[in-house]
Amino acid sequence: MSNKIYVGNLSFRLEERDLQSAFEQFGSVTSCKIITDRETGRSKGFAFVEMSTADEAREAISSLDGSELEGRPLRVNEAKPQEKRERNRW
């Protein structure tokens, strides 16, 4: 299992420090990034969190999946490897 976690169904008002705080209950968070729209800078409603060990990631996933954060049930699971995308050449 990877240390990288996908977190979906986030409140658009949630800040990275709040998300990181939720995951720090399960170990050391090495990175936390809420994905934003390139043009508007607004949250897209999902994030990636990386824990220091796979065991910490596994515990965070099992504990936080379906739990509520700012009134929304989180979708938490292991992040899938990023697929290679071709760049548009205009």
Image (cartoon, rainbow, N blue to C red):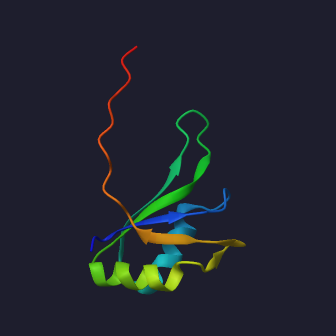
Residue 50 in the image: above or below residue 89: below
Q: Nearer the viewer, residue 82 or 48?
A: 82
- Residue 31 sits in quarter: bottom left
Q: Is residue 87 left or right of residue 22?
A: left
Q: Is residue 9 left or right of residue 71?
A: left
Q: Nearer the viewer, residue 1 or 50?
A: 1
Residue 65, x across and y down, in percent: 53, 78
* Quadrant where the N terminus is found in the figure: bottom left
Instruction: Tell me what residue is drawn at x 49 percent, y 59 percent.
Output: 47
Q: Nearer the viewer, residue 55 or 82?
A: 82
Q: Is residue 23 left or right of residue 83?
A: right
Instruction: Tell me what residue is drawn at x 33 percent, y 36 percent.
Output: 85
Residue 8, x across and y down, in percent: 55, 63
- Residue 50 sits in quarter: bottom left
Instruction: Tell me what residue is drawn at x 53 percent, y 62 percent.
Output: 16
Residue 11, x across and y down, in percent: 66, 62
- Res 2 seen here: yes
* Quadrant where the C terminus is found in the figure: top left
Q: Is residue 60 left or right of residue 9?
A: left
Outermost residue toward the right in this view: 71
Residue 1 in the image: above or below residue 43: below
